[in-house]
Amino acid sequence: MDAKELGRKGEALARRYYEKSGYTVLEMNYRTRMGEVDVIAQKGGLYVFCEVKARSGGPYAPREAVTAAKRRRVMLAAQHYVAVQLGTEVEMRFDVAEVIWQEGNFLFRCIENAFSF
């Protein structure tokens, strides 16, 4: 499985995770000039902005690939989404979804509140 396909499958797993957890998925791959958010979900007054990282093994956890620069771009894209789509301040949470393809199986873990402003 190539990296692009693995990324798509990881995003689909994250979407299912949020839907099964009672969230409404509002956007997938929301892009702005400033950055991108892989999954935007809402539950009540809480808006979750999730970065999905998928890997096929290796010595490092996928979450370790979410650098300070990447976190900044996700937060800027989230601020853009809130300003343009909602027009008001909301409660926001930033998650990282880890997806590991290992021995023919997907391992999935969602790290809630993985980073903040």
Image (tube, rainbow, N blue to C red):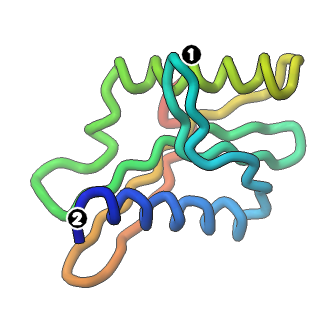
- Tag 2: amino acid: Asp
Say which residue label 2 marks: 2
- Tag 1: amino acid: Phe
- Where in the figure is residue 76, as x and y percent of width and height? 57, 17
Residue sitting at 48 percent across and 41 percent down? 51
Left or right relative to 4: residue 79: right
Viewer-side residue, 113 vs 74: 74
Other-residue count near label 2 (Cα within 10 Å), few / some / many at <14 / 14–19 / ≥20: few
Residue sitting at 25 percent across and 58 percent down? 3
Q: Determine the image quadrant of residue 46.
A: top right
Residue sitting at 54 percent across and 60 percent down? 14
Viewer-side residue, 3 vs 50: 3
Left or right relative to 44: residue 47: left
- Where in the figure is residue 84, as x and y percent of width and height? 79, 20
Q: Secondary structure beneath disc 2?
A: loop
Left or right relative to 33: residue 56: left
Whether label 2 touches label 1, CB < 8 Å: no
Q: How many marks?
A: 2
Q: Quadrant of the N terminus?
A: bottom left
Q: CA distance from mark 2 to mark 1?
A: 33 Å
Q: Secondary structure beneath disc 1?
A: loop
Q: Which mark is residue 43?
A: none
- Where in the figure is residue 78, as x and y percent of width and height? 64, 26
Residue sitting at 31 percent across and 57 percent down? 4
Q: Residue furthest front?
A: 33
Other-residue count near label 1 (Cα within 10 Å), few / some / many at <14 / 14–19 / ≥20: few
- Where in the figure is residue 107, as x and y percent of width and height? 36, 70
Q: Which mark is residue 117?
A: 1
